[in-house]
Image (cartoon, grey):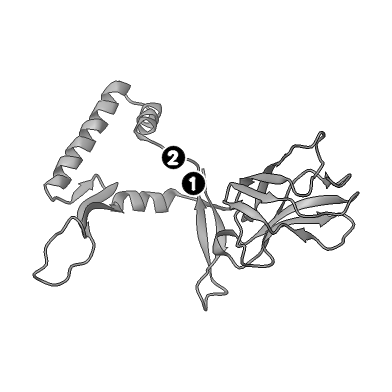
């Protein structure tokens, strides 16, 4: 199976024509998955025994690291202790309130060599992240779906919904299907990535609207737009 990747433009100044690869992992594997792969490759050792050996290996590695040793695990990975934090001078000493003991890791030479020799890469089209509107509800609730009530408390649930309210081009917009100017909701009660709560603004009777969220995702420079699948209609003033 190939290693899937997409290209992302560098955010660094002066790097307009530089792109880097972003890997799309095929999943995650735990110790049980490793044991299953060993058994599937063919072994005369029982699965329970393989698991026991790996568990004992982890225990042994842990104890050696606690002894301050650098552990080279069969060319797969090098593990070694390190201290995070800075010291005020040569007479300073480890202080658990300012420093932290941790473990660092580097891919082993054997594994790196094998991977670089055998791995293949497969480019995928980049996915554009935009606000995703999953559900829209109101209080009071209209008697039929697809109706919008000005002045009602509305809730939008979804993903990547949060916007910068200080920017005029970001926010919640009711966009008339006739192409007239969109109407922006100005009274926002909750603004989070997964939920928006706001008051529905005054809208024109009898018009159909698309409900849109416009936001810049993760501090990006490009404005993204997400739209509710359903069309909303104001059939009368409430």
Q: Position of residue 166 (x, y in %)?
A: 61, 66
Q: Which residue is at the front of the view, 174 or 222?
A: 174
Q: Residues within 10 Å of mark 1 (few under 14, many from 20)?
A: few
Q: Quadrant of residue 135?
A: top right
| Residue appearing at x 26%, y 23% in the figure | 49
Q: Is residue 76 left or right of residue 215?
A: left
Separation of residues labelled 2 and 1 (CA atoms): 8 Å
- Farthest residue to the left: give it: 91
| Residue appearing at x 80%, y 55% in the figure | 202
Q: Position of residue 109 (x, y in %)?
A: 29, 53
Q: Position of residue 18 (x, y in %)?
A: 54, 71
Would residue 45 be visible to someone looking at this image?
no
| Residue appearing at x 22%, y 55% in the figure | 100
Indicate whether 35 appears above or below 163.
above
Q: What residue did someone put label 2 on? A: 28
Indicate whether 204 appears above or below 64.
below
Local SS, label 1: loop
| Residue appearing at x 37%, y 49% in the figure | 114
Q: Quadrant of residue 157?
A: top right
Circles 2 and 1, Cβ within 8 Å, touching? The answer is: yes
Q: Residues within 10 Å of mark 2 (few under 14, many from 20)?
A: few
Q: Is residue 142 left or right of residue 57?
A: right
- Numbered circle sitting on residue 174: none
Q: What residue did someone put label 1 on? A: 25
Local SS, label 2: loop
Indicate whether 146 appears above or below 85.
above
* Image quadrant in which the C terminus is located: top right
Q: Position of residue 52 (x, y in %)?
A: 25, 26
Q: Quadrant of residue 165?
A: bottom right
Q: Which residue is at the front of the view, 2 or 220?
A: 220
């Amino acid at each position: 199976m190939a290693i899937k990747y997409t290209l992302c433009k560098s955010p660094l100044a002066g790097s307009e024509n530089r792109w880097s690869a972003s890997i799309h992992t095929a999943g995650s594997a735990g110790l049980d998955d490793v044991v299953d792969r060993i058994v599937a490759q063919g072994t005369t050792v029982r699965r329970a025994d393989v698991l026991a050996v790996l568990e004992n290996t982890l225990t042994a590695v842990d104890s050696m690291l606690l002894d301050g040793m650098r552990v080279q695990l069969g060319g797969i990975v090098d593990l070694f202790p390190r201290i995070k934090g800075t010291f005020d001078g040569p007479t300073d000493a480890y202080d658990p309130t300012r420093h932290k003991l941790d473990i660092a890791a580097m891919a082993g030479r054997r594994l790196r060599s094998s991977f670089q020799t055998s791995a293949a890469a497969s480019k995928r089209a980049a996915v554009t992240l935009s606000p995703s509107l999953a559900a829209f509800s109101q209080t009071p609730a209209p008697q039929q779906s697809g109706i919008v009530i000005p002045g009602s408390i509305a809730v939008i649930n979804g993903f990547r919904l949060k916007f910068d309210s200080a920017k005029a081009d970001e926010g919640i917009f009711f966009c008339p299907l006739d192409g007239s100017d969109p109407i922006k909701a100005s009274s926002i009660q909750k603004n989070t990535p997964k939920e928006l709560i706001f008051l529905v603004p005054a809208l024109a009777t009898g018009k159909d609207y698309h409900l849109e969220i416009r936001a810049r995702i993760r501090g990006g420079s490009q404005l993204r737009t997400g739209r509710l699948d359903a069309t909303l209609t104001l059939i009368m003033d409430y």
